[in-house]
Image: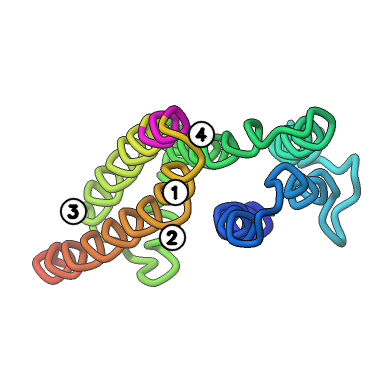
Amino acid sequence: MPGRFAAAALLLPSMFWICLWRDWPFWPCGFVLLPLALPRRGMPLFSAASSRMGWLPGALAAAMGVLALVFRSAVSLQYYPVLISLLFLCLFAGSLAQEQSIVERLARRADPDLPPRGVRYTRRVTQAWCVFFVVNIALTLWSIGLGEKAWAIYSGCVSYLLMGGMFAGEWLIRRHVMREAPHG
């Protein structure tokens, strides 16, 4: 499901610019969010994951699309990037309450014998991503207040550049940390 959410997060700001360029209204782009409520192939609607509220993000996204279509207003579509950042914040923050953070789980795919220093580092990276998502939510909400063009620039470009910068910076730092960390 994350792939569908990410595709919609990239598609909506791009579609805004197309609509602006063609002088079309933006609210019909609500159709983009409707398929997010559908279960994935091979995942029954009432599976164990669905019963644990796994269906909620897709339902919320689809509701945003429905609101845009019913009220012929793009306002609800502008809150979709907020929903995505909020979902990632919950995912990353929730993993901090578990034995392994999400970043540690990802790191262990490449290095199953992660040293204690690496474990501490991955926990810090998970915390840093939580801060990133909080800031991204705040900036996205701020950009909504500035108008559709400011929102599209931030949500469709700036936020992805910031995320890419964080990925690249973390990768460089991780190489340094792991080089210095002794493997047991």
Expressed as whole percent of the image width and height from the top left, the position of residue 13 reads 55, 53
Task: Give whichever of 34, 52 is nearer the camera.
Answer: 34
**Label 2: how many Cα within 10 Å (few below 14, some 14–19, many 20+):** few
Residue 146, percent from left and from top: 41, 32
- Under mark 2, the amino acid is Leu
Structural distance between the alpha carbons of marks 2 and 4: 20 Å
Left or right of 150 in this view: 74: right
- Assess disc 4: are there few (<14), some (14-19) or many (≥20) residues with their C-alpha within 10 Å of its C-alpha: some
Separation of disc 1 and disc 2 at Cα? 6 Å
Q: Nearer the viewer, mark 1 or mark 4?
A: 4
- Disc assigned to residue 106: 2
Write down the residue under mark 1. 102
Residue at the disc numbered 4: 86
Decide which of tag 2 and tag 4 comes sooner along the chain. 4
Label 1 and label 4: CA atoms lie apart by 16 Å
Quarter holding the N terminus is bottom right
Q: Are marks 1 and 2 in contact (CB under 8 Å)?
A: yes
Mark 1 and mark 4 residues within 8 Å of each other at the beta carbon: no
Q: Which residues are drawn in magenta?
A: 139-145
Badge 1, how many Cα within 10 Å: few under 14, some, many 20+?
many
